[in-house]
């Protein structure tokens, strides 16, 4: 088992789906966990019941600089240090490209891409002995998916930021990487008008024979947060059961 006892971890969007699974996995490994949420405090409190230690519950919009600063003020006060950041919180506008507006662009890119950079800028000064930063991406960063224009662009931007941060921070013993998941049936997928088709198509084409589950992503996140990943920098690790290798 991977042991992370005493490590301090922040998971944004940690009250549901992939974020929740990662928060639970890190807690099981011994981490003290801070869970960021935007609106649903009850969901965050429900996650807290499954963790080994009471987490910090941090309400805030990760695309808002004041909210990010407030979250890190609490982390500084309560912990004084940070070892792990998982930038998982995401949102986005799902529309055909010809219907998108500048407002849609800012909403999607600020939450899905800028947030990673903002979190890193606040976290690095607290990572005195090195650390791990992970961004959660998706296959839409490199594939054209109906109505996924802006979310796909935001995930591609996130993966690029990961590479640049990795180059900048490797000398500080800070690993920066991304995890790109295939189709995962979470609450976020309910916003897709073609949800059923996406699930069916993925089930049929995935060599592993099943959809990716949040716990699959969480296990890889745990690995990336451990010393086993010491020489992995700036990479995007795909978890899709082999879906993306099938023609």
Image: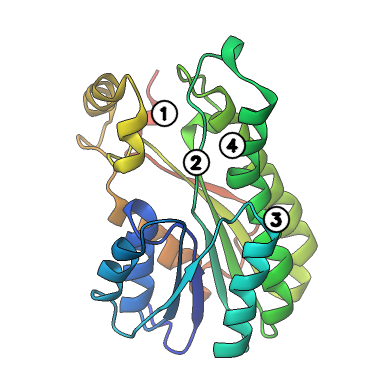
x and y percent of residue 75 in the render? 58, 81
Badge 3: how crowded within 10 Å, few (<14), some, or many (20+)? some
Could you tell me if the residues under marks 4 and 2 are in contact, i.e. CB atoms within 8 Å?
Answer: yes
The percent position of residue 87, horizontal first and vertical second, equals 54, 57
Q: Are marks 2 and 3 in contact (CB under 8 Å)?
A: no
Residue drawn at 55 percent across, 72 percent down: 84
Mark 4 lies on residue: 108
Q: Of discs 2 and 3, which sits in the foreground?
A: 2
Q: Earlier in the sequence, mark 1 or mark 3?
A: 3
Closer to the chain start, of discs 1 and 2, is 2
Circles 3 and 4: CB atoms closer than 8 Å: no
Pointer 3 residue = 117
**In the picture, which quadrant includes the N terminus?**
bottom left
Residue annotated with mark 2: 91
Question: What whole-number distance in Å separates the C-alpha atoms at marks 1 and 3?
Answer: 30 Å
Q: Secondary structure at mark 4?
A: helix
Q: Earlier in the sequence, mark 4 or mark 2?
A: 2
- The earlier-in-sequence mark between 3 and 4 is 4
Q: Nearer the viewer, residue 77 or 241?
A: 77
Which quadrant, please, contains the C terminus?
top left
**Numbered-mark total:** 4
Whole-angstrom CA distance, mark 4 to mark 2, is: 6 Å
Q: Quadrant of residue 194?
A: top left
- Cα gap from disc 1 to disc 4, whole angstroms: 28 Å
């Amino acid at each position: 088992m991977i042991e992370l006892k005493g490590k301090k971890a922040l998971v944004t969007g940690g009250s549901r789906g992939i974020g929740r699974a990662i928060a639970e996995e890190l807690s099981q490994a011994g981490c003290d966990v801070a869970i960021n949420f935007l609106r649903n405090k009850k969901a965050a409190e429900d996650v807290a019941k499954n963790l080994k230690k009471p987490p910090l519950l941090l309400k805030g919009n990760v695309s808002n600089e004041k909210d990010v600063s407030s979250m890190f003020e609490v982390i500084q006060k309560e912990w004084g240090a940070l070892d792990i950041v998982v930038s998982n919180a995401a949102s986005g506008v799902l529309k055909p490209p010809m219907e998108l507006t500048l407002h849609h662009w800012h909403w999607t890119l600020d939450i899905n891409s800028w947030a990673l950079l903002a979190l890193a800028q606040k976290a690095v000064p607290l990572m005195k002995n090195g650390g791990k930063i992970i961004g959660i991406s998706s296959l839409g960063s490199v594939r054209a998916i109906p109505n996924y224009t802006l979310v796909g662009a935001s995930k591609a931007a996130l993966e690029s930021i990961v590479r640049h941060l990795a180059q900048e921070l490797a000398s500080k013993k800070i690993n920066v990487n991304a995890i790109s998941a295939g189709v995962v049936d979470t609450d976020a997928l309910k916003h897709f008008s073609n949800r059923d088709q996406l699930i069916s198509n993925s089930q049929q084409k995935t060599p592993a024979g099943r959809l990716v589950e949040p716990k699959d992503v969480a296990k890889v996140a745990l690995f990336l947060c451990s010393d086993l990943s010491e020489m992995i920098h700036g990479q995007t690790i795909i978890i899709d059961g082999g879906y993306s290798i099938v023609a």
